[in-house]
Amino acid sequence: MHHHLNVDRKEVSDIPVNANPLFTRPGEATDFPRFALPDGPSDPQTAYQIVRDEMMLDGNARQNLATFVGTWMDEYADRLYLQAADKNMIDKDEYPQTAAIETRCWTMLADLWNAPDPTKAIGTSTIGSSEAAMLGGLALKRRWSEKRKAEGKPVGVPNLIMSSAVQVCWEKFCNYFEVEARYVPVSEEHLVLDGHDLASYVDENTIGVVAIMGQTYTGAYEPVTKIAAALDAIEKDTGLDIPIHIDGASGASIAPFLQPDLEWDFRVPRVASINMSGHKYGLVYPGIGWVVWRHESLLPESLVFRVSYLGGNMPTFALNFSRPGAQVLLQYYQFLRLGFEGYREVQQNCQDVATFLSSQIGKMDAFTLRSDGTDIPVFAWQLADGYTKNWDLHHLSAQLRERGWLVPAYPMPDNLGDQTVVRIVVRNGLSHDLAGTLMRDLRESVDYLDSLDAPMPEPRVKQGFSH
Ligand SMILES: *Cc1c(COP(=O)(O)O)cnc(C)c1O
């Protein structure tokens, strides 16, 4: 009869015995080639250990205050993830239930974002907000060109209007799909796109305006109703009917819960489409985004592919073909698990931690807040005017990194480019308790830097600006 001391012991005993101790095996004791395929196979335990050890050298996800992307789900989600790891999202005919769940998810989002009739909305899951933004942008571009042609008017070079503080995915969209990016610069007077002077950017080749709900640099919302009002005035003057696409990568899963009265979504008639990152405040592991159009008529039929195989005929609009289906199921799990009230609680807690931190940091002599975390739970600060010591914010970031905290310092865009800011993204998992430890480490870092009586050398590694 077998006696197992514990579960670990049992698992180990099920694996064929390799006489060598783990860290002295070939591959462990010698180096695997790094840039060429190894000549032959190796023990799975050895290969596993090598990969695990390399993973260990990455930063600690819980102390990563640079990223917006989810790093924690509960154990039931982990279980589902493993069980769904083999599902390919494009096999809608083979996995009709996963396809049905995808439709339920974006219909729920259409409803959450106040589409006039969610059953008449249309949407899809994507790999993230970047792909979702490309699809939103492509629909704007195609609608514009089809309209121009139908009116017998020339189709010139299309342009898209947005803040100079947009996330890089919009620069990519314009570059890859040959659309002229018309950037409205951010300045001290206009920290976000707010509709001022919009008429000087719009012409008959404008395919749309992007409004950001939760600017990457500061977390600030752009005032969608003001932008819409400016476009209403332009339409009155010129007859040009310019749609708005909302980049709600973060904010589309914050505003419905924390600012329910703020009108930024399909309540604003000019808003044609909205993207959101399921893997940000949608609370799913990396690899999921969503895009929803207010009405199916806003997604040109000429962009939809009808893939017929395995006997099925499925309409799709995507840049990729095969991609993981697991994240869609995880999104559905979170929707069922948390519901509206659960999401509200999680987001409120993040916001409470963000405003706690920003109020503490705002009180320190060294700093001035750039934002306070009351839009999305993200805030940024800069050195106070006239605070000239022997250090800058890159040194602060390096000091925090020594204590395991990943907090980036980076310049603001264009007109504000001479200003460096530090940003903290508060995500589910940064508890009040951990935030207290962060404040202690931050104060100690500032005290240490203040005590230096010669200029600090440039940090060797600068913490990158993570989107
Ligand atoms: C993160 C982010 C994106 C890109 O989203 P991914 O899901 O990482 O592709 C786009 N826009 C904004 C405002 C973002 O914050």
Image: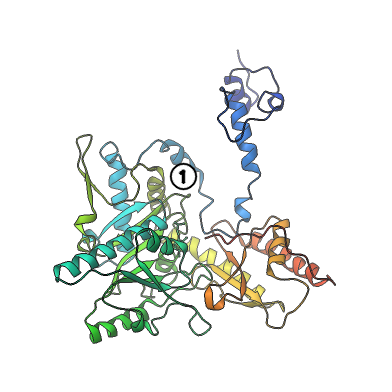
- Disc 1 marks which residue? 77
Q: Quadrant of ligand 1?
A: bottom left
Amino acid type at mark 1: Ala
Q: Residue at x 26, y 65 (%)?
A: 294
Crowdedness of circle 1 by 10 Å Cα count: few (<14), some, many (20+)? many
- Residue positioned most to the right: 453
- The location of residue 46, given as percent across then percent down, is 62, 27
- The location of residue 225, given as percent across then percent down, is 35, 79
- Decide: is 247 above or below 312: below
- Residue positioned most to the top: 1
Q: Tell me, yes or no, if residue 355 can be seen here.
A: no
- The location of residue 72, given as percent across then percent down, is 53, 50
Left or right of 403? Residue 318 is left
- Considering depth in this image, is 419 or 369 the residue closer to the camera? 419
Q: Tell me, yes or no, if residue 28 can be seen here.
A: yes
Determine the secondary structure under disc 1.
Answer: helix
Quarter the N terminus occupies: top right
- Whether the residue under disc 1 has CB within 8 Å of ligand 1: no
Q: Residue at x 43, y 37 (%)?
A: 85
Give the total of numbered labels.
1
Q: Residue at x 72, y 79 (%)?
A: 365
Left or right of 387? Residue 420 is left
- The location of residue 317, given as percent across then percent down, is 28, 52
- Decide: is 57 above or below 390: above
- Quadrant of residue 267 within the rendered picture: bottom left
- Quadrant of residue 184 within the rendered picture: bottom left
Q: How is colour applied across the structure in the image?
A: rainbow
- Considering depth in this image, is 432 or 40 the residue closer to the camera? 40
- Considering depth in this image, is 294 or 457 the residue closer to the camera? 457
